[in-house]
Amino acid sequence: MNGQMYQICCITAAVKKALKEKSVLSYTPLKYENRVEFQFLPEKKLFSTKKYKAEDASAWYKYCLKKGLRDIKFLAPVAVQDRNLLSFSNTTQSSIVCFYRGSKVTYFTANWEFDSAQKAWNILYTEQEWNKAPKGKPHFENNSDSFKSVLTEIKEFAQRIDCDSFAEVFQKALDILLGSTDYTDIKYNRPFPGIPKQNLHLFEAASTADVFGAMGSWNDSPPYMAYKKGMDKEYDSLSAELLKQVRLAMLYAINEW
């Protein structure tokens, strides 16, 4: 899973945990994060307009509570027009949705910019109104069975097009779904989102199976290798289904507990 998606999942989970426990926010920035800020919508005061920017996740959470935050959700599309674009920054199309008292709903989207001097990323989350939010909060089902099915299919497909290294990746994701704690994110020293154990298995399986990136990813050589064997249509359909199940797994793991 790329760093942008990982961050938004961890922040959402941290807020959800803090809301449940009525505690302060516990979020540890990763080493490649230089600055994480949150720009709120302008607020009209008696004689002026106030634009508040929180300097970190803790300050953002405190201000959200002050505004009446009651719940939070992570949202992301389960399909994209071009999977190759997922190798670039600011293409996850994900958001943090905030539910406030009085039925007000807003959402935050992130913009990542690389700071060459600090050799790290500056991230700005910007709040936007959700004027036509659907009634009720989004709910997601546990898709473990469907996820296992596509992982099994795409693992066998990877073997047939001589992509054994990817077959091993898909098998590892399957193993995690079946209970293995050999989590891929351990080697990156990423702090796990504070979610229940069952949800963490699903989240880490999704993180492992999220193979859509740039050079060396499932988007790189495998399409050509499938094309040479006349299996390009199968590659496209299985890849689309894999992305769908990865995203559904993330949505359930982060939101439903």
Image: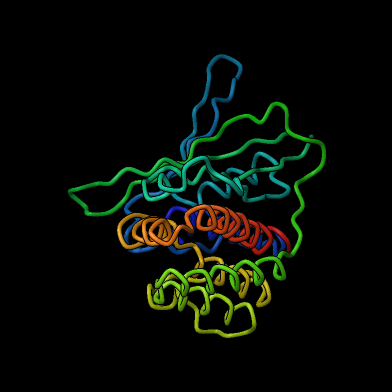
Q: Residue furthest left?
A: 117
Q: Residue furthest top?
A: 47
- Which residue is located at x 34 percent, y 54 percent? 214
Q: Position of residue 77 (x, y in %)?
A: 60, 45
Indicate the quadrant where residue 97 lies: top right
State the residue in front, 215 or 115: 215
Query: How many dots with numbers?
Result: 0
State the residue in front, 44 or 20: 20
- Asked if residue 256 shows in the view, the reply is yes
Above-or-below relation of 256 to 83: below
Task: Please state, as top left, top right, bottom left or bottom right, where the C terminus lies in the image.
Answer: bottom right
Q: Position of residue 226 (x, y in %)?
A: 43, 60
Left or right of 176 on screen, residue 196: right
- Which residue is located at x 30 percent, y 57 percent? 215
Q: Residue furthest right?
A: 135
- Which residue is located at x 72 percent, y 62 percent? 20
Q: Position of residue 167 (x, y in %)?
A: 47, 75
- Which residue is located at x 46 percent, y 78 percent? 168
- Asked if residue 18 shows in the view, the reply is no
State the residue in front, 172 or 229: 229
Q: Position of residue 16 (x, y in %)?
A: 66, 58
State the residue in front, 231 or 222: 231
